[in-house]
Image (cartoon, rainbow, N blue to C red):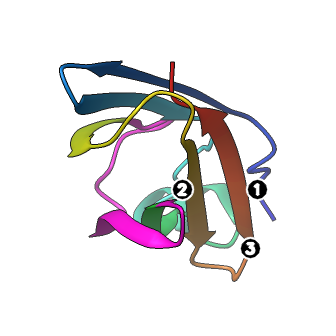
Amino acid sequence: MANLGKARIKAKEKKGIVTVKAMAKHPMLSYQEAERAKKKADFITHIIGTVNGATVYEVSTSQFLSKNPYIKFEFAGKKGDTLDLTMATLLGEKQTFSAKVK
């Protein structure tokens, strides 16, 4: 399984809008690349962002997302909130990363 162990998340609030910039460390191995490397295909398939139990961002992705994907989105929020970003891979690995809104 690929390692979803690292992610950088920056969440900054300005005038009631929180801008999130996140980068996940993941090889995003497509089916064709996996076949050539004689490995299993593995890429991030789903990303969910939640704040205080409410979903503020949700996306289904595919093998065509770049290696170490960069994600940027905005939502209405305030300083001090905790953003949880959950990522799931094709091989069933799931991990949640957290960041405080500054």
Residue 48 or residue 31, whichever sits in front = 48
| Residue 40 in the image, given as x and y percentages of width and height | 67, 73
Image quadrant assignment for residue 47: bottom left
Element assignment for label 2? loop
| Residue 51 in the image, given as x and y percentages of width and height | 49, 57
Residue 11 or residue 6, whichever sits in front = 11
In the image, residue 39 lies in the stretch drawn in magenta: no
Residue 98 shows in this picture: yes
Disc on the earlier residue, 3 or 1: 1
Position of residue 11 in the picture relative to residue 76 (left or right): right
Q: Look at 45% across and 66% down and name the residue there.
A: 48
Q: Give, as a three-letter code, the residue at label 1.
A: Ala
Q: Find the magenta span and give its range.
A: 51-70
Q: Which mark is residue 93?
A: 3
State the residue position of label 1.
2
Q: Give, as a three-letter code, the residue at label 2.
A: Leu
Element assignment for label 3? loop
Q: Which mark is residue 29?
A: 2
Element assignment for label 1? loop
